[in-house]
Amino acid sequence: MKLFPPVVARLLALFSLPALLGGCNLVVLSPAGDVAQQQGNLVLISTGLMLIIIIPVMIVTVLFAWRYRESAKARYEPEWAHSTGLELVIWAAPLLIIICLGALTWAGTHLLDPYRALGRIAPNSTADHTRQPLEVQVVALDWKWLFIMPEQGIATVNELALPVDRPVRFRISSSSVMNSFYVPAMAGQIYAMPGMETRLNGVLNQPGRFIGFSANYSGAGFSGMRFPVNAMPEAEFERWVEQTRAGEGSLDRAGYLALERPSENEPARRFARVEPGLFDAVVNMCVEAGKMCMHDMMSIDARGGMGLAGTINLTTLAYDRYGRRGATQGTREVVGAICTEPTPVQSHAWSRPIDQTPLAGMSLPRPSSRLGQSRPQPFATLPALTPDT
């Protein structure tokens, strides 16, 4: 026995969808960080502007189909060719929408640039530029996440703790394949690539436990690359740091090489001490002893190379696809390290405070002024290498 006719049953199922969707966690549109909230607002505004065109077009499509159906006996005008009013509507409305979307995209591209230092931590609270943001160095491993906090001198695997209302600057890289770092409650996703460094600025305004994960497929253990992000008040965060420092475990280069070997569903762990400069060695792909770092190689190339001596300065590399996974087969030759003065790790200067004046066409510096400040140095001004005699 049927309780409802088929048409009524379909309508009831259709109207029940909003109630079912109400149980979904729409964290992208209701995040805990100011940057993610601005990105969510950008999505809603853009969708609303596009619906201004989409909804009338859908309505007019139905009206035209109904009005000019075969049985309606509508007026027949086979010689009709032009309507000024119709042309204005067809061209003016989409043009205005495109202009609005273009202005919105331009402003959002600059204000929500992941490399841009935060100008505010909340809608009515500007960032304190007298205090540096918390730096977190992120390395995407197979298949887990490594977080290094150089200021605190600690590291964690598949666990991240952050203070509330303090800007955070992420420096992101990868050990092997391309990955993607994403904490929806905090900010947008940013890619992690081997031999490169990307950056992301964000802030969490609410205490709680949130989820971060990889948004880019990276192999068999991809589904296990999820980690908790614990946002806590500043005092509680300091206690968490002290507890981690009081624990056991030290992460040096040898420990990192063992950690980067592929493993799935790794439990969270903490390291009380971290070897200085480890992240920069990961980015320059020279964690192993005896391998030349990329910045040294580029510095030599900038001077014209090593000449004939470079043809014999080769070593067997255990850093390739097989060596990185703990296997023994497969070898590859690369340029070996030369004895030079250690290249100091440059401190990453924070950009100047953000001007809170509403963004307008003339609010950003001209490209020429930026290029003038970042011109490459002549070769003569670069520090000279000192080979071991």
Image: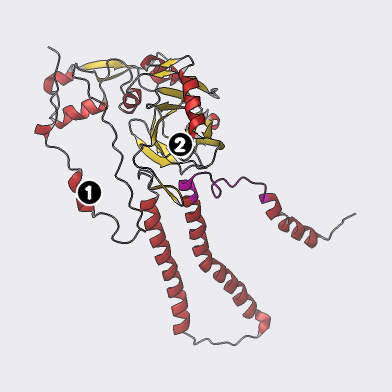
Left or right side of 199 for 86: right
Pointer 1: residues within 10 angstroms few (<14), some, or many (20+)? few
Distance between mark 2 and mark 1 Cα atoms? 29 Å
Q: Position of residue 17 (x, y in %)?
A: 69, 54
Q: Earlier in the sequence, mark 2 or mark 1?
A: 2
Q: Amino acid at mark 1?
A: Arg
Tell me which corner region of the image, top left, top right, bottom left or bottom right, holds residue 198. top left
Q: Residue at x 23, y 53 (%)?
A: 367
Please say if 79 is above or below 239. below
Specify the segment rendered in magenta: 21-37
Give the quadrant of the C terminus.
top left
Left or right side of 284 for 254: right
What's the mark number on residue 181?
2
What's the mark number on residue 52?
none
Please say if 321 is above or below 125. above
Rendering colour mode: secondary structure
Q: Nearer the viewer's eye, disc 2 or disc 1?
A: 1
Q: Farthest residue in the top direction?
A: 389
Q: Is residue 103 at all visible to an observer of this figure?
A: yes
